[in-house]
Image (tube, rainbow, N blue to C red):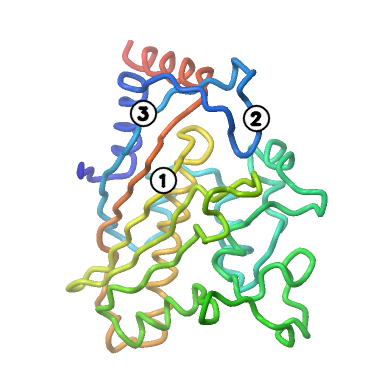
Amino acid sequence: MTYHSTFAQAIESVQRQLITHSHDIHTDFWQAVNISNRPEAAMKELIYVEFRVPLPVITLQYYRDDIKPNLPWADDHFEKERISGEPLNPGTTWKDWPYGLAADKHRTEGEQFSHSYAERYWPRYAGLTPGGELWEHATNFKPNTGTRYGLGDLSDVISLLERDPLTRQAYLPVWFPEDTGAVYNQRVPCTLGYHFMRRGNNFHVYYPIRSCDFVRHFRDDLYLTVRLTLHILNQLKERDAKNWKDIVPGMFMFWAGSMHCFVSDHARLKKEKKESLK
């Protein structure tokens, strides 16, 4: 796995590879939309991209400057929805995302998306109230369950790390069994999940993602995962200062099955890179 000392270096490396070593691909579907007859939907793709970057500080501004996500959207989305404790769908922050108009086309007739990160972080009562808000009586509903047990959520992952700091089981899934096979021709999550592990004084995160748009999602995906990692670590420090006060962010490990961009974006990236070298 390639090592980079900063996210800026990792992003630049992926961009360089995308420009010089990507291959043409034109899938029949993109986000559940048939694009087989749309030449402009052709893409450039790298497969099985992976790297690791150290997380040297706990200060958010460092990562804002290093990753350069879409701000203030990424912070608003994370704080208002991803860690809200409520399975919000559609939520409100999608409207402020730079590509929100495109996202709006993927809402169903019920005005919801096929999934949201808030639903996947907090699945226990997902889909039981319009919009995903937990009304006062929502907890009286029968919660969603798996094959044998109730569904876990982000708070359960944190609790597991609190009672068993060296656990190998601290995984927060975003890809659910209902996504398997995309049976209903629905949009399915790009993120597969997050694995957190404490070793020594370091708190590591492994972030596998099946598919990533370099231009529209890559930087936000990285930043939001960093924020999630820091959030969990901060929660653990508050809950159990004795055992977690000296623990610091460790290594960020990333894997993408497909890193891609549209051919028009590829041409622009190539032009920008050429001009930067003049």
Residue at mark 1 to residue at mark 2: CA–CA distance: 37 Å
Residue closer to the observer: 83 or 237: 83
Element carrying mark 1: helix
Tag 1: residue type? Asp
Q: Residue at x 44, y 30 (%)?
A: 260
The quadrant of the image that shows the C terminus is top left
CB under 8 Å between callouts 1 and 3?
A: no
Which of label 1 and label 2 is nearer to you? 2
Residue that protrudes farthest toward the top in the picture = 278
Q: Earlier in the sequence, mark 1 or mark 2?
A: 2
Tag 3: residue type? Gln
CB under 8 Å between callouts 1 and 2?
A: no
Residue closer to the observer: 95 or 187: 187
Q: Residue at x 29, y 43 (%)?
A: 50
Give above or below for 13 relative to 170: above
Which of label 1 and label 3 is nearer to you? 3
**Mark 1, residue position:** 65
**Mark 2, residue position:** 34
**Mark 3, residue position:** 15
The quadrant of the image that shows the N terminus is top left
Residue that protrudes farthest toward the left in the picture = 200
Mark seen at residue 187: none
Q: Earlier in the sequence, mark 1 or mark 3?
A: 3
Q: Position of residue 154 (x, y in %)?
A: 49, 73
Residue that protrudes farthest toward the right in the picture = 109
Q: Quadrant of residue 130?
A: bottom right
Residue closer to the observer: 68 or 16: 16
Which of label 2 and label 3 is nearer to you? 2
Q: Position of residue 181 (x, y in %)?
A: 53, 49
